[in-house]
Amino acid sequence: MVKITFKFDKEKDLWNNWFAVNFKSNLEKDRKFNNIPKLQEVCENKDFEKCKNEIEKFHEKIYSSYLIDETLKSFQSAWEKISGEFFRRLKKITKNEFPFENVTAYLTTQSLCPYDFKKGTFMISIWSNIPAMLKTSAHELMHLDFHNNNWEEVETEIGKEKTEKLKEALTVLLNLEFRDLWFVKDKGKKSEEQQELRKFIKKEWLKNKNYKSLLNKCVIYLKR
């Protein structure tokens, strides 16, 4: 059984605040990922160490608040109610062995939730409600699964950039096979290209629920 543990690490959150200000995405080139405008001028185009103290000062009240622990408890409790069923379905769909026995979900004060496919971690926003947290956690866990089990093979066929696009678009499967676990929709990236790829994945998945076949079809689609 895969164990997800929700934790708070101040250093990781400070870094993610800096990262959110400076992050640029190839999939959403015009998007601003920082949800705290005041930190934009503090961190933009600066080294992390030069703005770390100011970020910490900005968040000092929430860092000392009981809400950190209460949020962790509620997230942990809610996830544990669906964890077994989520991983059962994920394995049934992908036929993959999940790459980690233990995964850590770190609470963050940002809305940006990066993952680390080598360490088996991801971040989750403290501002999420329970259904959104469950969906986002599942979204990031799908990324961990794909990155460790399918990425290398796909990348040899279509390259890194298109593999990244496919990894993101595959989360449309959350809406088709998992949504009763949290009820909210995984909307995916907003670009027309991503939305068209998600439509293609949905159509092909509903024809024949075979993950390996789906990946092959997506590779052909992305080679065009």
Image (cartoon, rainbow, N blue to C red):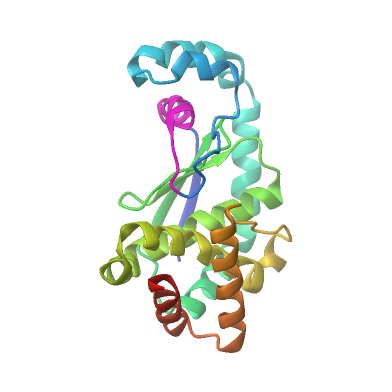
Q: Quadrant of residue 175?
A: bottom right
Q: Which of 177 and 155 lies nearest the eye of the viewer? A: 155
Quarter that holds the C terminus: bottom left
Residue situated furthest left in the rendering:
156
Percent position of residue 84, x then y: 56, 67
> Residue at point 49% right, 53% down?
4
Residue 120 visible from this viewpoint: yes
The picture places residue 79, in percent across and down from the top left corner, at: 60, 54
119 to 88, vertically: above or below: above
Residue 135 pos. (x, y %): 62, 55
- Check the picture and name the quadrant holding the N terminus: bottom left
**In the displayed structure image, the side of residue 206 where residue 93 appears, left or right:** left
Residue drawn at the location 55% of the way across and 30% of the way down: 34
Residue 2 makes an appearance in the image: no
In the image, residue 8 sits, relative to residue 92, either above or below, namely above
Whether residue 61 is in magenta: the answer is no
Q: Nearer the viewer, residue 128 or 37?
A: 37
Picture quadrant where residue 216 is located: bottom left
- Asked whether 15 falls inside the magenta stretch, the response is yes
Residue 167 lies in quadrant: bottom left
Q: Is residue 177 left or right of residue 42?
A: right
Q: Main secondary structure of the magenta part?
A: helix
- Counting the numbered discs, the total is 0
33 or 91, which is in the foreground? 33
Q: Which residue is most to the bottom?
A: 208
**Where 196 falls versus 102 (above or below)?**
below
Asked if residue 159 lies left or right of residue 72, the reply is left
Q: Residue at x 32, y 49 (%)?
A: 119
| Residue segment shown in magenta | 9-26
In the image, what residue occupies the spot 42% across and 79% down? 95
Task: Give the x, y percent position of residue 208.
Answer: 55, 89
